[in-house]
Structure formats: structure tokens, C-alpha cells
Amino acid sequence: MDHQHGRLLVVGGTHGNERTAPWILQCWEAQPALFASPLPTTNCIGNPEAYGANRRYMDRDLNRCFTEALLRDRNCTVREVSRARELVDTYGPNGKNPHSLVLDLHTTTAAMGSSVVVCGERPVDLALAALVHQAIGIPIYLFRINEEHPEECGFLVRRWPCGLVLEVGPVAQGIVDMGTVRKTAACLESVLAVLGDCLRSKAKLPESVVVHRHLASLDWPRDGDGRRIAGLHPDRSQWDWTVLLPGDPLFLMETGETIAYQGEEPVWPVFCNEASYEEKGIALSLTQREIKTPPADGLEALLALLGS
Amino acid sequence: MDHQHGRLLVVGGTHGNERTAPWILQCWEAQPALFASPLPTTNCIGNPEAYGANRRYMDRDLNRCFTEALLRDRNCTVREVSRARELVDTYGPNGKNPHSLVLDLHTTTAAMGSSVVVCGERPVDLALAALVHQAIGIPIYLFRINEEHPEECGFLVRRWPCGLVLEVGPVAQGIVDMGTVRKTAACLESVLAVLGDCLRSKAKLPESVVVHRHLASLDWPRDGDGRRIAGLHPDRSQWDWTVLLPGDPLFLMETGETIAYQGEEPVWPVFCNEASYEEKGIALSLTQREIKTPPADGLEALLALLGS
């Protein structure tokens, strides 16, 4: 084991039909100089079987399978649970080939641009996200962990001491779009540069960052048979990251009727029209915008993990 | 049977994960005044089972199942072949509820905008496509029928005396994007207006139209294991409908190498980065641009079908 430096795991294809990151990792393998990592770095395809089948998953969303309970349940035959266990046993902090940091590269069909998703509020993740935000300006989405809800726990990044999700869109599932490749590569480069700054003791947290804290997800209006009967209202030209005020048009019903947003406070929507969330009953998620002081102890924890 | 007028069948969801047209048909049902059809018109979901599952198809691409051989083979257990037979037996020109014209509404992940696809070169289809092109300006793609190749025959529209495919993109599979809904609705409105002109004897063919005739489809460069090792070259900002000259950059390899287009003539690519064509081994299709005189006998045949 290398005690000098932390190791970085870069995962693409956690969802098998998000093909941008696997393509980048494939190019990186063919061109080792494509990205300069300041740390010993391992690349892997999160869900190789689903990637081969060009499907999000085979049995279950891999990125909801990393709960303690599922990882412990050796009788579970769900393919993604076995794969989650394999990833943790191989690359986890106590695995055969231990890694201390993970980047999980995703795409979305939502027109969100590039963003960094923090799952939970570990100071170390917040510190790294704040440094990335400072470096490249992409928004931060703070997703809450809710162990009571199967869609709100079990994220890959949580099984490593530090981990971020990079999310880039809009791009259709199943394709490699070179514009999306470029945006994702720019985010990856930025994280690698930030980690290099940390190793050279040059990282300095910003005094404050704007974060978007998850509040709730909204389902589509549905009829008695569960059939979806609305779309996102066309009068908003931009949905993601753009304030939605009480009374603003929210849904356009099949009848032509407009449903206004009923909340009492301004919210900032994200993941509007993410194709894979249809089955989760999520039309969009709502966040509140906050100014947050990045935690100094998070940066200390990050530096300790990096072994710098 | 109504011998006064032809009947129009409008199909959405021939591919179950192309959700724009089913949404439009759902709105049309909820708001009968949404579109004014000059003909008795029936709407239907092409592949309801795949639509319910949010998949392109269950067993086989429905829009390749309308061959004479498959429709005759009563022992075939492929779900889409049974559905094709059901559609023909119900709404076909000799079905229980006969229709003489069909519109098949599709979307693509390719950034093609709106277009009209003519499968084969039936004069009646060419005449209607020319009228639509004249009315709304969208490009015409002439797809060849090749009974020897399972991917190049068996199209739904060919089982009706007259039929066009309307294709709108780019949009991700699995979502309803209101911009794409608007573009598709505009195309549908235009076809209905053209048919109204025909019924009022006001339709006049343009003297000439530009068409894009299918030449060939190109697969991605692959390695010995069949793994794709290239993407569309990022130096072209627009791929579809934009001339590709001999020597122009075509593919960017995983190694960073550029592969130039090797053909001897200028071509116009279409369906660049269509997600569902990955499994068909199609990276993009090439067309040649031609000026064509719309066939007068095609317009006569159309008017006869309309019973005007």
C-alpha cells in the first residue's frame, strides 16, 4: 500500500447508457497524456454489463446499490448489488487495491450544463466541491441522503472517504456527443488541477460558495390510471438553475391548462426532464439556493486523504 | 366504408421511447380542436407495449416488421410482427377500418431539425412530400427500400397506399421536450393543411424540389473485438444536411487521430449520432442532393386516394 499519496478512482458508465465518460476513459487509456493526474489514478467502468447492453442498468440502478444493508446481504442476486460489492471490495478504502477518492462521471438529458453533485454533507466533499466550483464555476447541487427512501441512498461516492459526482447535460442516452465529451473533460481536468493544488499546498477555500440544496422532487401530474398528463410548461425557456417563483407556470396539462407552482418560497429546479427519472416518478427536483462557508476541517480532511 | 373521402391514420410511438408524438396524440384526444384535420382521421400508438415499457421495441424494431414475408408468417412469435399484422388488419387499406394514408411521427437524437422521410419512391409519396416541403420548407430524405437487407425494408408506411414519416430532432429518448412537441405539431399541421388544399383542389406541385437520396450508411471504426473506437469529428459544428467533402474530417479516433472522409463526391450526412442506430451498426447515413421534378401522376394518385 502506498502511504505517500491517496489514490483516485475515476468511474464512468455507472449508468450503462451514459456513454460520454466511458468514451473519455477509453481515449485516456489510448492516450495516457490526455489528462495529467497528480495522484495515482485508476479508471474503471462502473457497470460493464449494462454498458455492453447500452442500458442504464440490468436489474437495478447501480447508483442506489451501495447501501450497507445491500452490500452485506450476500444472498442478494441483483446483478448491480454484486457489482457494487465487487467495486468496494476491489477499490474501496479497505479493498484489495484501496483508493481514497472517487469521481463518478455522469450525464443527464436535462439541460443542466455541467455541475458537481455532493451526496450528503461530508465536509471533505464540500471542501473539494467548493474548490472545483472556485476553479471552473460550475454549480453545486447538495443532494440529501435519506436512508428511509431507496431512491435517496446507496450512492457509489458514499463508499469512499471522499467522492463527487460530475453531471453534464443535456445529452441523449446512448450516444457520444463531442460537445458533451469536451465539457466533461473540462470538469475532469479541473478536479485534477484542484487536487494538484492541494498536493502542492496551494489550495485555498473560497470564503463562501453558492450551493443548491435539494428540497424535494416533484412527480408529473397523473390521471387515475397513473398515466402522465402534463409536461414542463413551455413558457419557461430555461428550467434548470433558474428561479421558479410561487405562481409561475410549472406544468402544461394535456387539456391545455396551466398548473402554477404552488410553493411558498422561490426554488431553483434541477434535473428537469431527466429521461431515466420517469420510472422513479420524478419530473424535476427543487432546490433552495444558499450561501455556505466551505468547511475548513473538510479541506484538512482532504489534504490528509491525499497524504500531502 | 366511406367512399367520399380517404381516411388518414396518424401513428405515434412506433418506437416506444420516442415520446413526443404520443404526447401530441394524447393532447389531441383531450383537446379535439387542437388540430383541424380535413379528413376522417384516426390516431393510434404504434407499439403500445414498448411505449408502456419506455423502450424502442420489445423483441424487434416494429418499423422493420411490415414486410410481406413477416406479415404472412403466422407462426412468428415476435411481438412486433403480431402488432404489425394487427395494425394492417385493422387500419390497412383492406382492413376492418380501412385508411388510405398514414403519417408516422418519429423523433431522433440526431440534430436534424424537422424532416420528411419518403420510404421508396412511390410517386404519391413524393407528391405529398413535395407539397409539404413547399408549405413548410423541411428537407426531404429519400430512403431506399432494399428487400435483401432486414434494416432497409419492412417500414410501416409502405403498407398503406400513401404514407410519410415525419422525423424531428434532436431530442433524447424517453422524454417529452416541449420544443420538440412544437416542431412536430407544426409539421403535422402543415400536412393537414396540404391535405386540405388537395381536397379543395388548391394543391399545386412545385416545379422542382431538392431531395436527399440515401446512398449508404457508415458504421463506426471498430477494433478487432467490435469495440467502437471513434466518434464524429468535433471540428464540424453541424453534421446533418451539411455537405461533407472528400478529405473533410469524419471520425476522431480514440488515439486522437483524424479519419478523413474517403469518398469521391460531396455527400450530405443525415441521422448523425442517432442513439438507436448504434445496435444497427450505423454511425451516420450519407445522401446525395438532387433536384427532382415532383411527379404529376403522384398528385393525381393522391387526389384519387383522398376521394376529392
Image: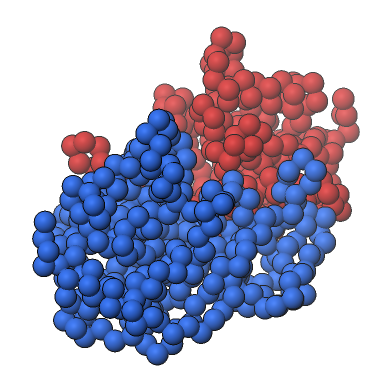
Chain colours: A blue, B red
Q: Is residue B60 above or below residue B270?
A: above
Res B60 visible: yes
Outermost residue toward the top? Answer: B75
Q: Residue at x 58, y 71 (%)?
A: A287
Q: Nearer the viewer, residue B92 or B274?
A: B274
Q: Which quadrant of the figure has residue A51?
A: top left
Residue B103 location (% of width, % of height): 68, 41
Q: Nearer the viewer, residue A131 or B148?
A: A131
Residue A44 location (% of width, % of height): 26, 50
Q: Which quadrant of the figure has residue B56?
A: top right
Q: Which quadrant of the figure has residue B92?
A: top right
Q: Is residue B199 above or below residue A27?
A: above
Residue B122 location (% of width, % of height): 59, 35
Residue B67 location (% of width, % of height): 55, 22
Side (left or right) of B137 relative to B254: right
Q: In this view, does A73 lie above or below B77?
A: below
Q: Residue at x 43, y 54 (%)?
A: A155
Q: Which residue is drawn at 27% across and 58% down?
A: A10
Res B191 visible: no
Q: Nearer the viewer, residue B257 or A49?
A: A49
Side (left or right) of A40 relative to B229: left
Which quarter of the image is occupied by the C terminus of chain B? top right
Q: Which of A118 and B82 is in front in this view?
A: A118
Q: Which residue is drawn at 22% across and 57% down?
A: A99
